């Protein structure tokens, strides 16, 4: 590039020199030099005109060749032409990628919808038309909440809390259950994925019904068996000595089965029945004192030190029976798995996000790899430990469900050999004055 400009500058100097010599010969040096410069400027203007004409018609032609020129103008024309070719190749490459993406998404059974920062539809695949009833062309740039008028979807979409998917009925087929998952990207744009989970929903409903019905049917026979065993043990003087130990073991296991059935029925109720709209005004301090008092009585033989630390005048909106069950499960677990003479602390304090209720112990702790699965049903950190303590493996699952029904979260922190810390985070909208 520098060489071309030097060459052009040399041409200009040579032109001026020749004009000066001619002007000297005829005695009008200024006039001749001025005429030479005007001619040079006219040539530059003509080249600019050619460049403008080429650029104006360039979009209408397929890789139109640049005008013929020499010197610096030839370099400019060729440089623009090369840039145009690279841009056209890049556009074609991106277009081919977009075409492939659209073709592949069209083959998906899952609906894929792109929504701009204003909440309007930009693009969707064929499955979106089948599952959501979007009409190609007519619904372009329409607000997604105008087309999907379900109140729960509006709340989910505008709330921008997309960590968990939303399940609602299809707006065009009431027998379909759809799962919506939204991801933010770019400058406020959203990608929405929608899939048909009707079969999964039916299977989940069947599972819940099965667990609930079986648990209900088992409750009566287990209660009868447990009652007869208790009667026999109450009159052990009339029982042969060799049957005492088997009867005690049978009674212990029947009680364990009774506890499992009770917890399964509790889980079934939590999954199938919505939280009542008329909720209790819960005095948190009073609730925690009751839970602590019960734990002290149940685990009196382990000589634990229970401590309660709570801010005054804390009130929650919710189900007192469910929250009692959740917090007592956490406190009882801490007491069960903490060796004798352990320290267990129950606290409640306000935080930036709402209210935190914590249960802290100095027990055996839990290995890091087990923590993500602790709230799964029947998950065992150590099978022998659960057997020794008589645990059902459902306590933390109940805690998780109760907290979810109250808009709360459970966080678990633990270090093996140093104890555990369970934190219930209640949102601000659950607090009462």
Image (spheres, grey):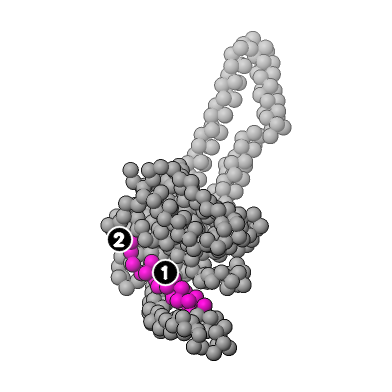
**Helix, strand or loop for the magenta stretch, by majority:** helix
Q: Residue at x 35, y 71 (%)?
A: 176
Of the numbered discs 2 and 1, the one sitting upstream in the chain is 1
Does dot 2 land on a helix, a strand or a loop?
loop
Q: Is residue 89 magenta?
A: no
Q: Is residue 211 left or right of residue 372?
A: left
Residue under pointer 1: 267
Front position in the image: 148 or 345: 345
Q: Is residue 355 left or right of residue 386?
A: left
Q: CA distance from mark 2 to mark 1?
A: 16 Å
| Residue 344 place in picture, x, y as percent | 55, 54
Q: How many marks?
A: 2
> Toward which corner of the image does residue 177 lie, by quadrant?
bottom left
> Toward which corner of the image does residue 398 lie, by quadrant?
bottom left
Q: Residue at x 50, y 84 (%)?
A: 236
Query: Quadrant of the image for the N terminus?
Result: top right
> Toward which corner of the image does residue 199 lie, by quadrant?
bottom left
- The answer to whether residue 404 of the structure is visible from this angle is no
| Residue 28 place in picture, x, y as percent | 62, 11
Query: Quadrant of the image for the C terminus?
Result: top left
Q: Is residue 268 magenta?
A: yes
Q: Is residue 107 left or right of residue 278?
A: right
Magenta stretch bounds: 252-276
| Residue 337 place in picture, x, y as percent | 58, 63
Front position in the image: 147 or 293: 293
Q: Residue at x 50, y 37 (%)?
A: 52
Q: Residue at x 64, y 38 (%)?
A: 75
Does dot 1 land on a helix, a strand or a loop?
helix
Residue under pointer 2: 276
């Amino acid at each position: 590039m520098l060489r071309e400009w030097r060459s052009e500058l040399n041409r200009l100097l040579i032109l001026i020199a020749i004009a000066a010599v001619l002007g000297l010969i005829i005695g009008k040096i200024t006039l001749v030099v001025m005429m030479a410069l005007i001619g040079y400027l006219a040539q530059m203007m003509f080249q600019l005109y050619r460049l403008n004409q080429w650029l104006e018609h360039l979009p209408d032609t397929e890789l139109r060749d640049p005008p013929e020129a020499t010197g610096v103008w030839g370099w400019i024309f060729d440089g623009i032409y090369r840039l145009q070719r690279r841009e056209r190749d890049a556009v074609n490459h991106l277009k081919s990628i977009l075409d492939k993406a659209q073709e592949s998404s069209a083959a998906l059974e899952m609906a894929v919808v792109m929504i701009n920062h204003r909440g309007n539809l930009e693009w969707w695949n064929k499955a979106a038309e089948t599952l959501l009833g979007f009409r190609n062309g007519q619904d372009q740039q329409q607000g997604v909440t105008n087309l999907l008028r379900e109140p729960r979807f509006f709340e989910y979409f505008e709330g921008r809390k997309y960590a968990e998917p939303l399940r609602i009925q299809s707006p065009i087929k009431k027998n379909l259950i759809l799962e919506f998952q939204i991801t933010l990207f770019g400058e406020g744009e959203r990608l929405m994925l929608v899939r048909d989970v009707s079969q999964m929903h039916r299977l989940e409903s069947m599972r819940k019904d099965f667990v609930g019905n079986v648990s209900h049917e088992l409750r009566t026979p287990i209660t009868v068996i447990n009652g007869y065993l208790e009667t026999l043990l109450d009159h052990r003087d009339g029982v042969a000595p060799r049957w005492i130990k088997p009867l005690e073991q049978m009674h212990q296991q029947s009680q364990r089965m009774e506890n499992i059935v009770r917890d399964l029925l509790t889980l079934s109720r939590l999954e199938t029945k919505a939280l009542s709209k008329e909720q209790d005004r819960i005095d948190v301090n009073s609730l925690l004192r009751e839970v602590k008092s019960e734990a002290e009585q149940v685990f009196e033989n382990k000589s634990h030190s229970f401590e309660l630390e709570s801010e005054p005048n804390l009130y929650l909106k919710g189900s007192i029976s469910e929250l009692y069950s959740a917090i007592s499960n956490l406190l009882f677990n801490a007491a069960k798995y903490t060796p004798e003479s352990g320290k267990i602390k129950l606290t409640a304090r306000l935080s930036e996000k709402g209210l935190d209720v914590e249960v802290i112990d100095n027990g055996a702790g839990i290995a890091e790899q087990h923590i993500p699965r602790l709230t799964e049903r029947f998950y065992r950190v150590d099978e022998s430990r659960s057997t020794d303590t008589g645990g059902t493996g459902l306590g933390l699952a109940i805690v998780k469900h109760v907290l979810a029904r109250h808009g709360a979260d459970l966080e678990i922190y633990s270090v093996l050999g140093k104890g555990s810390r369970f934190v219930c985070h209640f949102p601000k909208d659950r607090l009462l004055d």
